[in-house]
Image (tube, rainbow, N blue to C red):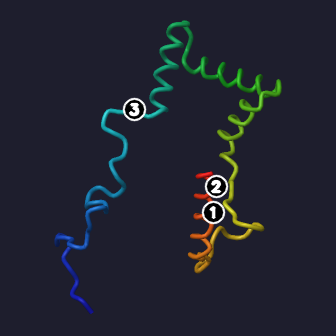
């Protein structure tokens, strides 16, 4: 059994394309860039001030308008309201006949090469 390395030991197993220590998931959002919720709230406050109303009242008015439009049959308003209330519906990824997309060992390289050659011939003609 190999000896346990101390926590501060240099990690020589990292390769060029992997994330480095202290950067677990990539660069993320750049510093100073505001998220949508912040931008939305700022716009809501600005619009409310321009119309001399309370921002919360304006937000209630927006939701009321969305519900009214959904009741008129506008699907996008209804869909947005349902997604916000209940989350988006799951959309499973399935393969042929509802089975898995691919199982281990399903790749037939010869068949794949034949299909690719056919597609290239079609594109050339």
Task: Judge the density around disc 1: few (<14), some (14-19), many (≥20) Cα neighbours within 10 Å.
Answer: few
Secondary element at image label 1: helix
Instruction: Give the quarter of the figure containing the N terminus.
Output: bottom left
Q: In this view, does 39 lie to the left or right of 72?
A: left
Q: Which of 31 and 105 is in front in this view?
A: 105
Q: Residue furthest bottom?
A: 1
Res. 80 mark = none
Q: In this view, does 109 lie to the left or right of 22?
A: right
Q: Which residue is drawn at 26% across and 60% down?
A: 20
Q: Which residue is drawn at 68% across and 54% down?
A: 90
Q: Distance between the residues labelled 2 and 1?
A: 6 Å
Q: Mark 2 points at which residue?
A: 122
- Earlier residue among tags 2 and 3: 3
Number of labels in the image equals 3
Q: How far apart are marks 3 and 1 (CA)?
A: 49 Å
Secondary element at image label 2: helix
Labels 2, 3: front one: 2
The image position of residue 113, as x and y in percent, is: 57, 70
Q: Mark 1 points at which residue?
A: 118
- Up/down of 18 relative to 83, above or below: below
Q: Residue furthest front?
A: 125
Image-quadrant location for residue 8? bottom left
- Earlier residue among tags 3 and 1: 3
Q: Do the residues labelled 2 and 1 touch (CB within 8 Å)?
A: yes
- Up/down of 47 relative to 6, above or below: above
Secondary element at image label 3: loop
Q: Residue at x 25, y 73 (%)?
A: 13
Q: Which of 108 and 52 is in front in this view?
A: 108
Res. 34 mark = 3
Q: Which of 69 and 54 is in front in this view?
A: 69
Q: Residue at x 58, y 64 (%)?
A: 117
Task: Judge the density around disc 2: few (<14), some (14-19), many (≥20) Cα neighbours within 10 Å.
Answer: few
């Amino acid at each position: 059994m190999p000896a346990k390395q101390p926590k501060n030991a240099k990690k020589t197993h990292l390769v060029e394309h992997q994330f480095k220590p202290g950067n677990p998931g990539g660069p993320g959002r750049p510093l100073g860039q505001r998220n949508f919720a912040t931008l939305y709230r700022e716009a809501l406050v600005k619009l409310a001030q321009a119309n001399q109303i309370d921002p919360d009242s304006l937000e209630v008015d927006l939701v009321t308008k969305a519900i009214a439009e959904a009741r008129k049959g506008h699907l996008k308003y209804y869909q947005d309201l349902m997604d916000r209330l209940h989350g988006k519906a799951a959309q499973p990824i399935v393969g042929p006949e509802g089975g898995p997309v691919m199982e281990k060992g399903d790749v037939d390289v010869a068949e794949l090469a034949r299909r690719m050659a056919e597609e290239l011939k079609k594109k050339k003609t």
